[in-house]
Image (spheres, rainbow, N blue to C red):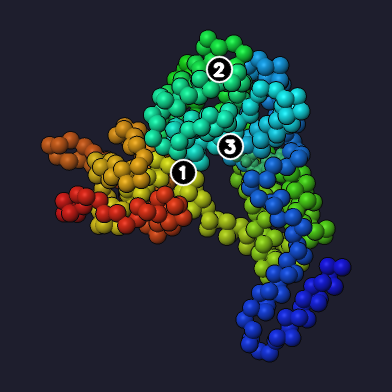
C-alpha cells in the first residue's frame, strides 16, 4: 500500500524530470517516501514519556510508595533523587505523576502534581510563579517581589485547601545561582497548616550537589532518597528495543544497530538519552540518504555529528546566570579584552543583567559560577599578581568565540545582548 503510493509519487515528480530542471522534485519525492524508516517520529523526541520504563520498576514502585499518602491527603515525605544525566530520573517522575494524576481526576481529590524544570525556569521568581499557577493562583510575569509571590502561594494553598506535590527537576541549577534559601522557605511553608501543604521532590544530575545545601535544608529535602544508577549496555538494549518497536517500521532498524548504539552509550556512562539520540540521528542520516534500513555506518556518522553538537548542548543547557557570565566574557572578548580580570567581568555581567531586566547575583556567587565554568572546561582562570594591589584572577574563554556566540544567538533573551558594548571598554582595552 505504502510502496504503491510512493511509486505513484515518484512517477508524478519524475515526469517533471529532465536534467535538474526541477530542483525541488527530488526533495519532494524523498519527503513523501520518508515514512520508510520512521513509523512515529514523536517517540524519539526527548520529551516523550514512554508507557513502559524497562529496568526502573523498582524506582517507580518506591516513588509511588513514598507519594501514596498524598492520595489520603496527608503530606508525603520530601524526596531527593540523584543520578547522572540520562538515568531516567525525569522519565520516572513524569510517569509516576501521570499515573497519580489519573487517580486524582477519577476520585476528584484536592491534590495537585506540579512538575517544574528549574534549569528551564531559570529564576526563583519563575519557579514560585509556576507553583502558584499550578494551584490556580495568578501571578504576573514580573513585577511582584519574591516575598509577595511566596505569600500568595502560601495563602493559595490554605484557602484552596489543596495538597501540592511539586517536582523541582534539576534543582541544582537553581541552588547554584541563588543558594538554598528558597528551598528553606518552601520546606517551612507547611508550618501551622494541617490538611494542605507542599511536598517536594528535588532531582539533581550533580552527585556533589548535597555539598551546596545547608544541613537543615538537606535533612528536610532528603527525608527520602532515591539513587539512579547508570544503565548497563544490556539494559540500554532493552530500552532501545522497546523504543525502536514504536518509532520505526518493522525491519528498518536491525538488532545489530541497536546493540551498537547501546554499547557506545554504555561506554560513556550509561546515559539513555545519549543512546536514544544516537539511534534517532542515525535513522535521520539514513533517511536523508534515501536508505530504508539503518546501518552501522549511519550510527558512526551520527556519533561524530553528535560529538560536534555537544559543546553547543553543554553551553545551551547552562543555568541562566552562567550564560550571562559567558555573555559578559563574550562581549569583552569581542571588544578587545580577551583576558579580563574578575572585576571587569562582574561589571559587564551587571550591565547585561540590567539590559534584560534580570536581578544580578552577588559578586561572590558570580565567582563561584566562574569556578564552575572553569571546572567544566569552558573558561580558564589564572591567578595573576597585580603588584601592590595584591592578586586577582584573569579569566579567558576556552571555547571558541563563534561557538559561544552561536549559543547566545539561539536564545531569544540572550541574542539581544550581542550588540552591547561594555561601558568601560575603552579604559580596559589598554
Ligand atoms: N528505563 C527507561 N526506559 C525507557 N526510556 C528511558 C528509561 N530511562 C530513560 N529513558 C529515556 O531516556 C531519556 C533520558 O531520560 P531522563 O529521564 O530524561 O534522564 P535524567 O532525567 O536522569 O537525565 C528520555 O528520553 C527517557 O524517556
Ligand atoms: Mg532529567
Residue under the image location 60 percent in, 24 percent down? 164
Please give left or right for residue 179 compared with residue 248 in the image: left
Of discs 2 and 1, which sits in the foreground?
A: 2
Q: Where the N terminus falls, by quadrant?
A: bottom right
Numbered tag placed on residue 158 in the rendering: 2
Of discs 2 and 3, which sits in the foreground?
A: 2
Label 3 sits on residue: 84
* Above/below status of 430 relative to 35: above
Of discs 1 and 3, which sits in the foreground?
A: 1
C-alpha distance separating marks 2 and 3: 37 Å
Q: Are marks 1 and 3 in contact (CB under 8 Å)?
A: no
x and y, in percent, of residue 85 in the image: 58, 40
* Residue 94 seen in the current view: yes
Q: How busy is the neighbourhood of tag 2: few (under 14 within 10 Å), some, or many (20 plus)? A: some
Residue under the image location 68 percent in, 31 percent down? 97
Name the secondary structure under disc 1.
Answer: loop
* First in sequence: mark 1 vs mark 3: 3
Name the secondary structure under disc 2.
Answer: helix
* Above/below status of 10 relative to 406: below
Instruction: Tell me which image quadrant ligand 2 sits in.
Output: top right
Q: Are marks 2 and 3 in contact (CB under 8 Å)?
A: no
For this rendering, which residue is in front, 48 or 164? 164
Label 1 sits on residue: 318
For this rendering, which residue is in front, 294 or 76? 76
C-alpha distance separating marks 2 and 1: 35 Å
Residue under the image location 52 percent in, 12 percent down? 191
For label 2, being within 8 Å of ligand 2 is answered no
Q: How busy is the neighbourhood of tag 3: few (under 14 within 10 Å), some, or many (20 plus)? A: some
x and y, in percent, of residue 148 in the image: 42, 25
* First in sequence: mark 2 vs mark 3: 3
C-alpha distance separating marks 1 and 3: 16 Å
Amino acid at each position: 500500500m505504502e510502496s504503491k503510493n510512493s511509486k505513484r509519487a515518484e512517477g508524478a515528480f519524475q515526469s517533471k524530470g529532465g536534467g535538474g530542471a526541477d530542483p525541488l522534485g527530488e526533495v519532494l519525492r524523498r519527503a513523501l517516501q520518508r515514512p520508510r524508516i520512521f513509523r512515529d517520529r514523536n517517540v524519539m523526541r526527548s520529551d516523550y514519556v514512554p508507557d513502559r520504563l524497562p529496568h526502573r520498576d523498582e524506582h517507580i514502585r518506591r516513588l509511588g510508595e513514598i507519594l501514596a499518602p498524598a492520595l489520603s491527603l496527608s503530606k508525603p515525605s520530601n524526596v531527593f533523587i540523584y543520578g547522572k544525566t540520562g538515568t531516567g530520573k525525569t522519565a520516572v517522575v513524569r510517569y509516576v505523576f501521570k499515573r497519580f494524576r489519573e487517580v486524582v481526576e477519577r476520585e476528584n481529590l484536592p491534590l495537585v502534581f506540579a512538575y517544574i524544570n528549574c534549569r528551564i525556569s531559570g529564576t526563583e521568581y519563575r519557579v514560585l510563579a509556576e507553583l502558584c499557577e499550578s494551584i490556580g493562583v495568578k501571578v504576573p510575569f514580573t513585577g511582584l517581589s519574591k516575598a509577595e509571590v511566596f505569600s500568595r502561594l502560601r495563602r493559595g494553598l490554605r484557602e484552596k485547601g489543596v495538597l501540592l506535590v511539586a517536582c523541582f527537576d534539576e534543582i541544582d541549577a537553581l541552588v547554584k545561582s541563588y543558594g538554598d534559601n528558597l528551598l528553606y522557605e518552601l520546606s517551612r511553608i507547611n508550618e501551622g497548616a494541617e490538611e494542605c501543604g507542599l511536598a517536594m521532590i528535588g532531582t539533581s544530575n550533580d552527585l556533589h550537589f548535597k555539598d551546596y545545601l545547608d544541613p537543615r535544608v538537606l535533612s528536610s529535602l532528603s527525608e527520602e532518597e532515591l539513587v539512579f544508577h547508570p544503565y548497563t549496555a544490556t539494559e540500554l538494549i532493552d530500552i532501545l528495543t522497546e523504543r525502536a518497536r514504536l518509532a520505526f517500521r518493522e525491519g528498518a532498524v536491525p538488532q545489530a544497530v541497536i546493540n551498537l548504539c547501546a554499547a557506545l552509550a554504555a561506554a560513556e556512562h550509561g546515559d539513555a538519552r545519549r543512546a536514544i539520540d544516537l539511534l534517532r540521528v542515525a535513522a535521520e542520516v539514513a533517511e536523508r540518504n534515501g536508505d530504508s534500513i539503518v546501518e552501522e555506518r549511519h550510527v558512526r556518522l551520527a556519533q561524530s555529528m553528535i560529538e560536534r553538537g555537544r559543546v553547543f548542548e553543554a553551553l545551551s543547557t547552562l543555568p541562566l546566570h552562567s550564560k550571562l557570565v559567558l555573555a559578559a566574557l563574550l562581549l569583552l572578548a569581542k571588544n578587545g579584552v580577551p583576558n579580563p580580570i574578575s572585576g571587569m567581568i562582574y561589571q559587564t555581567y551587571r550591565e547585561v543583567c540590567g539590559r534584560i531586566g534580570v536581578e544580578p547575583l552577588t559578586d561572590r556567587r558570580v565567582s563561584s559560577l566562574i569556578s564552575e565554568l572553569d571546572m567544566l572546561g569552558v573558561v580558564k582562570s589564572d591567578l595573576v599578581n597585580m603588584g601592590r594591589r595584591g592578586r586577582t584572577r584573569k579569566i579567558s574563554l576556552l571555547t571558541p568565540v563563534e561557538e559561544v556566540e552561536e549559543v547566545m544567538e539561539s536564545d531569544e533573551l540572550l541574542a539581544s545582548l550581542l550588540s552591547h558594548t561594555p561601558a568601560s571598554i575603552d579604559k580596559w582595552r589598554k
